[in-house]
Image (tube, rainbow, N blue to C red):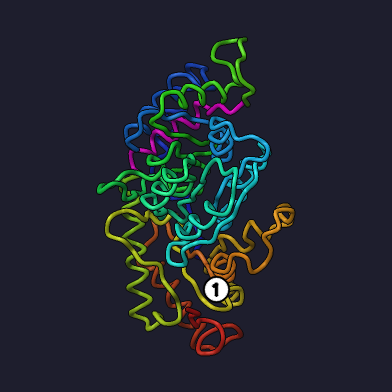
Amino acid sequence: MIKQLDLSEQYSRLNPEILDRIRQVFETQHFVMGNHVAEFEAACADYLGAKHAIAVASGSDSLLLALMALGIRPGDKVITSSFTFFATASAITRLGGIPVFVDIDPLTFNMSVAALEQALKKHRSVRAVLPVHLYGRSADMEGIMKLARKYGVRVVEDAAQAFGARTRFRGTYRKAGTTGDMGCFSFYPTKNLGGAGDGGMIVTDNGRLAALLRTLRVHGSPKRYLHTHLGINSRLDALQAVVLSVKLGHIEQWNHTRMELAKRYNELFAGAGLSTAVTCPDVPEDMTHIFHQYTVRLKNRDSVRQSLQEAGIGSEVYYPLPLHLQPVFRYLGQGRGSLRETELAAKQVLSLPLYPEMTVDQQVQVVEAFGRIRSAGAPGAGAGPGLRHTP
């Protein structure tokens, strides 16, 4: 069995150092916030190239707190992608805001800049844009920021899947999450930089926003028993901070390895004569994609996935039902057919096993499984209706 994600080897390699750091936390008995969290925040700010990093309890909270800091209120519209995890949009609606879903670029799976401009022209009361760096690939922040400046809206980046990815901006490269007003990250265990539980972070170069975020994450309290804002309880545990601090030192190498694995997958699919059957992601040379997921497109995805499962190959679908079609968002009125590229991607995408410790032999086994499915002509496979690319 080849799992879609296997963290066991990573943790076995790091356990001695992690356990030592955990022991230090227990010796100090400072379990919430404190020096360990402050050190992790400083290290992240330095790595990402941001002036301020504010650690919080989860990636979902990072999005919610960022929008709270912008003052999103009932009736305010926030433009975002429908092809993302639920938390992206729920952060908007929890504040009474109105998500405006726009279509994606079919190559990158990220927010289409052209679709964003159409939405900005069409809708009034737009307060912010919330682009998503999906699968570890940076959105077109150059285009998004240009439109944000033109229309006077704020930008919060959902970089939950893109810690360490780079984005082109003003003739240079910056880390994803550092070009907008704020960038939001998740440290859920499956992420490229993942903890041993929930955790999140917000980065910004704006000192006023940073101070407000630090207040909002502790019940709106700038000092003990004084409450100046209606905040929430969203503090990062020191235990998570030390685990993440250990892993932060490896993130650049892990991301490079993920890119190499993605490149090898593409070469293996091409070498197996499957290039016209499986649409592989392109692998940029500049770290603008750090492959949180290696996601292919293929026709009759579900039947192919079933065949892979029977062959002992794990896979996942991110995401099978776009947010604009979720029952909870039906009231927004963006029905089926309104976001063509998003809906097509949801039917075709499949994320294959990829993690830094994956071996060449394991990748070969995955690609060979695709070849056997095609050769067998099983329902939904091969020269029949399955592994055939739909442009």
Can residue 197 be seen from the camera position used here?
Answer: no
- Residue 384 rendering spot, x and y as whole percentages: 55, 89
On screen, 388 above or below 40?
Answer: below
In which quadrant of the rendered view does residue 317 lie?
bottom right
On screen, 266 above or below 187?
Answer: below
- Residue 369 rendering spot, x and y as whole percentages: 48, 77
Predominant SS of the magenta segment: helix
> Which is more toward the observer, 380 or 204?
204
Q: Residue at x 38, y 45 (%)?
A: 176
Secondary structure at numbered mark 1: helix
> Which is more toward the observer, 212 or 116?
116
On screen, 141 above or below 284?
Answer: above
Question: Where does the magenta region start and end?
Answer: 233-250
Q: Residue at x 48, y 55 (%)?
A: 117
Q: Residue at x 33, y 38 (%)?
A: 249
Can residue 210 be seen from the camera position used here?
Answer: yes
- Residue 55 rendering spot, x and y as whole percentages: 48, 30
> Which is more toward the observer, 140 or 371?
140
- Residue 172 rendering spot, x and y as whole percentages: 25, 47
Mark 1 is surrounded, within 10 Å at the Cα level, by few (under 14), some (14 to 19) or many (20 or more) other residues, namely some
44 left or right of 69 in image: left
Q: Residue at x 42, y 28 (%)?
A: 21
The residue indicated by pointer 1 is 308
